[in-house]
Image (cartoon, rainbow, N blue to C red):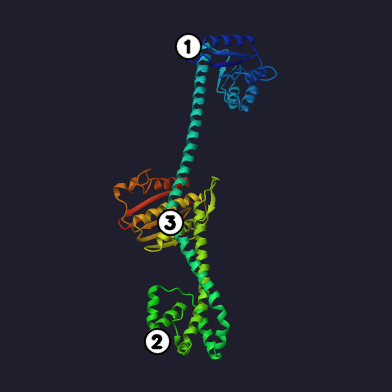
Amino acid sequence: MEIQNSKNIILVVDDSRTYLVVLSQILKKQGYKVETASNGKQALKSVQSTLPDLILLDIQMPEMNGYEVCQKLKADDKTREIPIIFISGLNKIIDKLKAFSLGGVDYISKPFKKEDVLARVETHLKLHRLQQQLAAQNQELQKALEELRNTQEELIQAEKMAALGQLIAGVAHEINNPLSAINSSVMTINNFLTQTITQLPEFFRSLSEEKQQAFFALLQTSLAKETLLSTKEERELKRKLISQLKNIEDADIVADTLVDMGIYDNVEEFLSLLQAPDSEIILDFAYKLSNLQRSSKTIETASQRASKVVFALKKFARFDQSGQKVEANITDGIETVLTLFHNKLKHDIEVIKHYAPLPPILCYPDELNQVWTNLIQNALQAMDYKGTLTIKVSQQDKQAFISMTDSGKGIAEEIKEKIFEPFFTTKGAGEGSGLGLDIVRKIIEKHEGNIAVESQPGKTTFTVSIPIH
């Protein structure tokens, strides 16, 4: 019975000189390299200097029996994987059970047959080789899996930054608008401070007590108004005011000024003031003073808007490298993404939100933000940036459901099954990598969730479900 591998090292441990010699001769004739030890201590010392591929171990030995030797070998990381075949004259079931419970792979009873020993030795050497190969393959697979995970993380980050790049123009516009409003308001305040404030004492001295009361009533009415009017509403109010101011010179100019100040109701109480010879000066001062408050409110609102966009941008662009799930509010993440899309949504897109209360979810918030970004971006493109986007957040049992429905042209039935495949895209060259929905699916699966799509012309819904742990 020749074997292919003649370099296997077998350690034979037995206190019987006869058995040591017999076993050594049998194994050497088969091409094995044999080491011997006559007691447990010698066996442990031999293993430390030369690791065998297999051990034949007697049980009944002085000082340290075979069971104790096996326990020590299995307790050592260096030697625990070496297969041990017990070979003993003890033939009771309880002795064999103990041998297997301590980690033995087989049990040969003395006296033994040569063929039986060789068959079992070869079998367990082959099994050990296969286990080693399997362990090496598992290690390679683990390494490949880790590389795959790293690649996926890089793809997610690359897709996130690509989406961020598409949003940059809109984000810049969203920041430039409030900055322009702030700049304009600051100029208004500066002009007032440099040109008008020095004239106020003389202006108030020139007013009679009755005119002063009327002036302050006009100013307070203006300052109390906070409602923002549309251009259409302003036009209608100005036309109405002009008819009420028909006996006043330059009624159209006065009407424009009053509407700008927020004064368009019950103007009868101010008619005497507006009909006075110095009404133009009085109205100009009232307009400039009320404009101070409007300018300060504009600065406050614009600053909040810019801060909101910058905060959303920071939340979106950050990359959590801890690799750990954290508790996060799903709705907050969706709102962050909507803030960054505001410039593309505010004109021809109606956003309808149905947010049911939802507890914080243990998740990877950065990656979920990427999901909402891709789904919203796809919805907008499907609608050619004109239509209705409906977002629903709900909870059922232990699942959170997030659906996004657009009123676009829909997804053709023949490609519906392909949209989640990597690199599949219906967009033109340079418009998409085809990785967006594939990454979305992988992120959702990473959260142990699911994503489904239903589509017909005029209504496409992507529904994401995520378990609430």
Instruction: Tell me if mark 1 has few (under 14), some (14-19) or many (20+) residues whose alpha carbon lies within 10 angstroms of its own.
Output: few
Residue 224 appears in the figure: no
Q: Work out whether residue 418 or residue 262 is closer to the camera in this orientation and state it.
A: 262
Left or right of 166: which side holds 58? Answer: right
Q: Please give the residue where the numbered disc 3 appears in the rendered image.
A: 169
Q: Quadrant of residue 344?
A: bottom left
Spot occupied by residue 195 in the image (x, y as percentages of width and height) = 53, 76
Q: Are marks 1 and 2 in contact (CB under 8 Å)?
A: no
From the image, tell me which residue sits under label 2.
Answer: 244
Nearer to the camera, 319 or 293: 293
Is residue 67 visible to us here? Answer: yes
Marked residue nearer the N-terminal end (1 or 3): 1
| Identity of the residue drawn at 52% across and 23% down | 128
Mark 1 residue element = loop
Identify the residue at image location x=50%, y=76%.
291
Image coords of residue 446 (percent x, y): 47, 45
Q: How crowded is mark 2: few (under 14 residues within 10 Å), some or many (20 or more)?
A: some
- Which three-letter amino acid code belongs to the residue tagged 1? Glu
Dot in front, 1 or 3: 3
Mark 1–mark 3 distance (CA, rounded to whole Å): 76 Å
The numbered disc on residue 2 is 1
Which percent across, then down, holds residue 270?
Answer: 47, 87
- Which is more N-terminal, label 2 or label 1? 1
- Between discs 2 and 3, the one toward the N terminus: 3
Q: Is mark 3 on a helix, strand or loop?
A: helix
Say few, some or many: other residues with alpha carbon within 10 Å of mark 3 (under 14 / 14 to 19 / 20 or more): few
Q: Callout 2: helix, strand or loop?
A: helix
Q: Residue furthest right?
A: 63
Mark 2–mark 3 contact, CB under 8 Å? no
Disc sitting over residue 370 in the figure: none
Residue that appears at 50% across and 37% down: 146
Q: Indicate the amino acid at tag 2.
A: Gln
